[in-house]
Amino acid sequence: MDTRILTFAAALAAGCSRYDAGSVSAAGISPEEHLEKVREAAVSIHESTPGAPVVASGDAKAAAAFAAFGEAEEIDAWRFTSDVSDDELAALRKTFDGSGGKAVAFVKGDGPVVPRFSSPAAGLLKGRLASPLLVAGTGRVYVVGPDGKVAWEKTGCGNIHRVWLHGGHVYYSNGSLYRVAYPGSGDPAAKPELVWRPKVAQGGGVLGFTVEKDGSIVMALNSTSEILELKDGKEVVRFAVDCKNAKGETPGPHGRLRMVRKTESGTYLVCCAGASMVREYDKAGKLLWEQSVPVLAFDCLRRADGNTLVGHVSGVTEYTPDHKVAWEFKGEDVPSLKLACLCGVQETPDGNIVVGSWANGEPDGSKATACEINRDKKIVWAWFPKSDANMMTAFRIDGSGLVGR
């Protein structure tokens, strides 16, 4: 593992970071701006050292303010710059875990950064997996074979929201879009290739994307609330998305857009996360359809029968074109998995649903982070990792080497 450490203080010029009265001030910078500085610094160091951990620093009060902002998943560790008691650490652990930061390690003083989750990737597969599984783990992408063993892994990938396989490459998004050669198609040790980086990265940049069968790339730009499609590296579609909720309110910078899918008819389904809405547009940006969901909309797909399947953290719901609920699934339907915070969805050829989750993994492997269920809500298989907190997308790989169809 790369031992270089990036702290927030180092990311700012001339040591201007300062923490006062329980809030991150950094010479007048708000907690939100603090988060953006961390993201900017992560992009900078990962240009040369993709596997370097991202570490924010400050006292216990500053750590609490950062975690309370809800984006603890953006860092690998918090380095405390002053003494912190065991009771404070216990309270902060609970706060960080609650905001999605289960992978965040705590470091006192000049101590080394020790990851909370094991490396290499590992876990227990329960049930029968019909084909290999491609997953976005905690700072890594990897493949679980039908035998339950990890067949391939790439670490140092940052906070991954989406992973995809196309043309001998694994693509992943962590604010920017990267790809790396899949085994047999190139050097597996090669440095990831930057495919596309947004000019505006506030809120996390690009989080959702798909690679279409013809190689075109469709992205949901959380930073600018836009859909962008690239064909042979050239922009062919770009339009603005309405991210407001039913009350006309606009969510914060990180809560605008998540996943996007291009339908067979050429329209674009996009999850407006903080608005708890799925909206469908044509290529000119005209709104064609929208569907409200119970809470944060993460992933969606258009089924062959015209219904729309949505992963919305509290569950997975299938909606008809006239907004009726045709089917739904929640974590409590399979209590043995201890499943929560459902995110990514895939429909397999036989109609089963593959589901990924956010901030649900535990180092002891006691909770599932991905599973496949049938339409009767029976478990086909489940993955209990000891190496991952997050698994926001999980896709079974079909015989053509494609996923997510």
Image: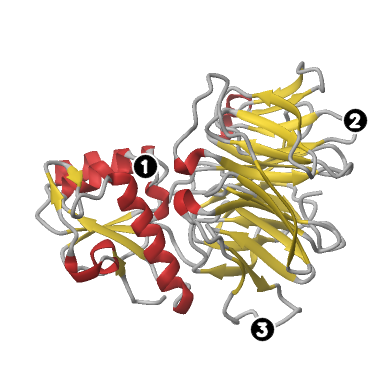
Task: Work out which residue is located at the far left of the displayed protein and give it.
Answer: 83
Q: Secondary structure at mark 1?
A: helix
Residue behind mark 2: 305
Of 373 and 54, the residue lying toward us: 54
User: Badge 2: few (under 14), some or many (20 or more) residues near its Cα, within 10 Å?
Assistant: few
Query: For the residue carrying disc 1, how many other residues have a C-alpha within 10 Å: few (<14), some (14-19), or many (20+)?
Result: some
- Going by the image, does 358 lie left or right of 20? right
Q: CA distance from mark 1 to mark 2?
A: 39 Å
Residue drawn at 50 percent across, 39 percent down: 255
**Residue 352: x, y in percent?**
79, 38
Of the image marks 1 and 2, the number of the one nearer the N terminus = 1
Quarter assignment of residue 87: top left
Residue 168's spot in the image, x, y percent?
Answer: 77, 72
Would you say residue 257 is visible in this rendering?
yes
| Quadrant assignment, res 403 | bottom right
CB-based contact (under 8 Å), mark 2 and mark 3:
no
Residue 187's label in the rendered image is 3
Which mark sits nearer the N-terminus, 1 or 3? 1
Above/below status of 10 relative to 116: below
Query: Which residue position is annotated with label 1?
Result: 97
The amino acid on which the numbered mark 3 sits, given as a three-letter code, is: Asp
In front: label 1 or label 2: 2
Q: Which residue corresponds to the image point at 85% horizontal and 59% vertical from the top-left?
A: 213
